[in-house]
Image (cartoon, rainbow, N blue to C red):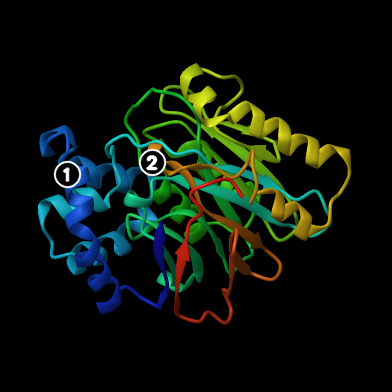
Amino acid sequence: MQLNWRAISEREPGPIWAGLFHEYWPDYHRWWVREGAEARPGYWDSVKALKAHMPEMMPLYDRLCELAGGTDHAARFLSFYCPPPYLSGCSQAIWPGAEPMLVRNYDYSPHAFDSLILHTAWQGRRVMGTSDGLWGLVDGINDAGLAVSLTFGGRRVVGDGFGVPLILRYVLQTCETAKEAGEVLRRVPTHMSYNVTVVDAQRRYLTALMAPDRATLITGAAVATNHQERVEWASHARFTATVERERFLLQRLTLHVEPQEKFIKAFLRPPLYSTAFTQGFGTLYTAVYRPRKQTLEVHWPRARWELSLKDFQDGARQIITPEHAV
């Protein structure tokens, strides 16, 4: 299976972002209306929610809506408020050595993935990360050296809140430390359960267990897979091997401090690396964020791509994803 990755920089939202939106919009629109447009909140409810919970994002939101053509559906989609449910796999961990380093696998359907790394300086804050929904992020880093990543929390409950990729964008646009990020994650509502791991340049880290039906729990966990304090969706847990992956990572964190490269390579092999692409849970990439260097390394079993927040270079990669365990 081939994925065509791109790394694109645009300082402020403009013609490049508009072109990306119109390229991706037909597929996103089909996904967004799959239950009927009436199943999604209206424009005014969406804007009201954004203003209440992420007011700093409103100038960006208005500009992006303009670039997207100003249609009702596009504006509601871009709010990320109460989107259709979606599931992913994913594993993430903080390396136990002295240097802050966040490593994550993103397990998801290759047919519903942007394959896009965005570098922006929106509202004066430089951010680099893996795109979802064209302004949301599933992982990323900012110019304060704050890195963040998400995993699905393994619960069926859906409620009123935002798609978590926009929450990650909000964290990176407005926060500089893990403590500040934790405060945001505690108060912004999510529409599904997610585990969000954050590490800053001082190697302070946390994992927020977010859910739509209960208060966010801020923990000191250095590992997150696809359940929260306990398994609540047994069939999903068995299929994604969330408990086995968590145990594997915890053993690597607690037995001894491995060299960085050895720790990273463990994510490129079972049980962390998944080839369940036809079921929508294959490992699309491994990301390595280094907060002090402000860099992102994207790893695959046979390729590696290094990107710098300070000296970002646009580019493209054609990646052949292994169909079998490596």
Q: Which mark is residue 278?
A: 2
Q: Residues within 10 Å of mark 2 (few under 14, many from 20)?
A: few
Amino acid at circle 1: Trp
Q: Relative to residue 20, is residue 167 drawn left or right?
A: right
Residue 61 falls in image quadrant: bottom left
Q: Which mark is residue 202?
A: none
Q: Residues within 10 Å of mark 1 (few under 14, many from 20)?
A: few
- Residue 271 image offset from top left, x and y in percent: 64, 38
Query: From this viewpoint, is residue 53 visible?
Result: yes
Query: From this viewpoint, is residue 233 visible?
Result: no
Amino acid at circle 2: Thr
- Residue 258 image offset from top left, x and y in percent: 84, 51
Query: Which residue does the image show at 16% across and 44% down from the upper left?
Result: 44
Q: Relative to residue 49, is residue 128 drawn left or right?
A: right
Q: Nearer the viewer, residue 249 or 185?
A: 249
SS for tag 2?
helix
| Residue pointed to by mark 1 | 44
